[in-house]
Amino acid sequence: MKSQRSVQDTGGKLYLVGTPIGNLEDITFRAIRILKESAVIAAEDTRNTKKLLNHFDIHTPLLSYHEHNLKEGGDRILSVLADGEDVALVSDAGMPCISDPGADIAARAIGEGYAVVPVPGANAALSALIASGLPAQPFLFHGFPPRKKNDRRELFGKMAVRGETVIFYESPHRLKESLRDLEAAFGAERQVALVRELTKKFEEILRGTAREAVEYAESADLKGEFCIVVEGADAEAVQRAEEQSEWWAGLTQKAHVEAVMEKEGVPPKDAIKIVAKERGEPKRDIYQAYHLE
C-alpha cells in the first residue's frame, strides 16, 4: 500500500474543501485558511463560489471544474499541482466528490502521486440522517435515484430489502414520482424523513410513513432539493429476501432461465420475464443470454 502523510508530504496538494450547504456560519476556520492559501480554487460553479469568497474576503483565483469539462479542467488542476502549488477543490455546497464530479480529479491526482487532503465540512446526507430519528448506523447513501422510471423502480426494489437506513437526494420537480415509486417498493408504512433547506431559514424536517410522504409531496409547494431518509427493512424481511435469492445466486443467466423453466413448468418466454425480475436486469439481456450463448 502507498502511504500519504498529508502534512509532511511536500509538493502540490489537492485539498477537498467542505463548504456551507446553506448557512455560511458552517464553514470552518481551516477551510477559510486553505481557500486563502491555495494557488487556485477549482469550483463547480464559479459564480456561486465567488459569492462565498466575497463574503469571507478571499481573493484566490478561480478555475472552472465541472462534469462537462472533466478532462480539460482536470488537466489544468494537475498542471498547477505539477508546479508544486496547492489546489482547493470545492463543490457548489457541501463536500466535494459526493454527488459531485470531484471524485474524478481526486482519483487522477492520486494516480499521479499527489497528496489528496480532506478538509471536512457540512454535508446534507449526514445532517439529514442524524436529524431523521432513524437508526444512524448502518446506513447506505445512494444519492440521486435514476431519472428513468423503470431504472428507479428497479433500484428501489433492491433497496427495499436492505437492512440499512437508506439516504437519497431528490430534486423538487421529481420528488412526487420518486416518492410514489418508493412507497410501492418499500411499503406504505415504512418510516421516512424528508429533509429540505438544511441549515437555511426555511429548514424543514418531515417524519412519518412513506404514504404520508407521498401525500405531503402531492399537496405541498415543493421548493429546494430534498434528502430522503428511509428506514431499513426488519431482520425477518432481510433474511427472507436472502433466502429467496440464494437458490440462483451461482447460476449464469442462461442456467437461471433453464432452472425456472424446470421449476415452474413455464416456456422460455415466461421464464425470461421471471429471471429478469429476480435478477433486476433488463429482459433483453436475459433473452440474448438464453438464445445466443
Image (spheres, rainbow, N blue to C red):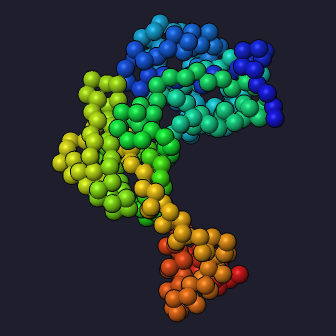
Residue 276 seen anywhere in this rendered image of the structure: yes
- Residue 149: where, in percent of width, then height? 40, 61
Between 85 and 281, the one nearer to me in the picture:
281
Residue 48 lies, with reference to residue 284, above or below; the image says: above
- Residue 131: where, in percent of width, then height? 36, 33
Q: Which residue shows up at 41% across the image and 37% down it?
A: 129
The image quadrant of residue 111 is: top right
Residue 65 lies, with reference to residue 215, above or below; the image says: above
- Residue 281: where, in percent of width, then height? 55, 69
Residue 1 lies, with reference to residue 141, above or below; the image says: above
Between 48 and 225, the one nearer to me in the picture:
225
State left or right for residue 283 relative to residue 135.
Answer: right
- Residue 18: where, in percent of width, then height? 52, 23
Residue 268 lies, with reference to residue 217, above or below; the image says: below
Residue 159 seen anywhere in this rendered image of the structure: no
Q: Which residue shows up at 55% across the image and 23% down it?
A: 120
Residue projecting furthest to the front: 236
